[in-house]
Amino acid sequence: MRLKSTFGRVAVVACALLFAAPPAANASHGRECDTPSIDRLQQWLASGEGVTEPATGSILVPRGRHDHTAKIKFLSNDWHVMVVWLGNRFEAEADLSRSHGFLLTYRASADLHVQLRPASDWSGGAKWVTKIPSTHGRLVTRFFGFRPDNWTSLPELGAPAYPLSEALDDARGLVFVGKTPNVLEFRGLKIDGYRPPCVH
């Protein structure tokens, strides 16, 4: 059936976009924080683990007058660690038990992984991970779901002693790890059903 009006065509397109979008695209995030942030996440940190540029501290840099991007380079063939605190301070926790996943806008010159680290078992490498594929330097937006079959462990780092559901209950951070040189940039991280609190 042909649609004879502009309104009809617009309505069909709008419905298609609504149902095609991943769940994370519907999360409410509001305006940015008063200090540098990406999707209200203020703490994007080089942890000092592995040879990185910068070596430690915030990796947020200005992009235009009001926006920021997060940039880091992994420089060696050893484990590198970059952290995003979900509650914008180390002590905070986020309940992601009802979240479908997160929408990441990024570029990467090599594959890496992201760990979901809970407050109850923050330290160590034995965590649930999902692969973040290389974009070969192109900026892309991809959805990463929280279904258990999307997550695994890395044999070299060990298997977690708790189910993924427990990590979602008291999530403290997303920790990006990689063992090869990589040029990384992050422009968006929207978590379905979660609105980070601005803390400064």
Image: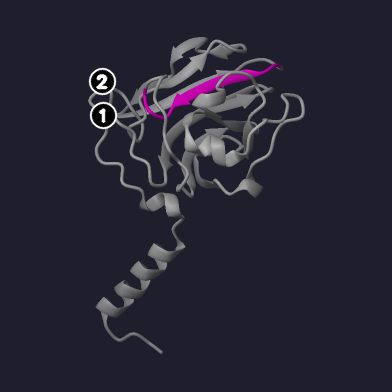
The foreground one among 69 and 164 is 164
Q: Looking at the figure, which quarter contains the N terminus?
A: bottom left
- Left or right, residue 111 beside residue 186: right
Residue count near mark 2 (Cα–Cα under 10 Å), binned few <14, some 14–19, many ≥20: few
Question: Which label was assigned to residue 33?
Answer: 1
Residue 82 in the magenta stretch? The answer is: yes
The foreground one among 52 and 175 is 175
| Among numbered discs 1 and 2, the one appearing first in the sequence | 1
Q: Which residue is drawn at 67% across and 26% down?
A: 126
Q: Give the range drawn in magenta.
A: 78-88
Q: Position of residue 47 (x, y in %)?
A: 52, 14
Is label 2 in a helix, a strand or a loop?
A: loop
Is label 1 in a helix, a strand or a loop?
A: loop
Q: In which quarter of the image is residue 151?
A: top right
Q: Quadrant of residue 89?
A: top left
Find the distance from the CA under tag 1 to the CA under tag 2. Answer: 8 Å
- Left or right, residue 162 beside residue 70: right
Identify the amino acid type marked 1.
Answer: Cys
Residue 121 in the magenta stretch? The answer is: no
Determine whether 60 is above or below 159 in the image: above
Question: Disc 1 vs disc 2: Cβ atoms closer than 8 Å?
Answer: yes
- Left or right, residue 122 beside residue 23: right
From the viewer's perspective, is the residue at label 1 or at label 2 nearer?
2
Report the residue marked by disc 2.
200
Q: Where is residue 76 in the image (x, y as percent from the top left)?
A: 67, 15
Q: Which residue is drawn at 62% across and 47% down?
A: 148
Q: Residue at x 61, y 25 (%)?
A: 177
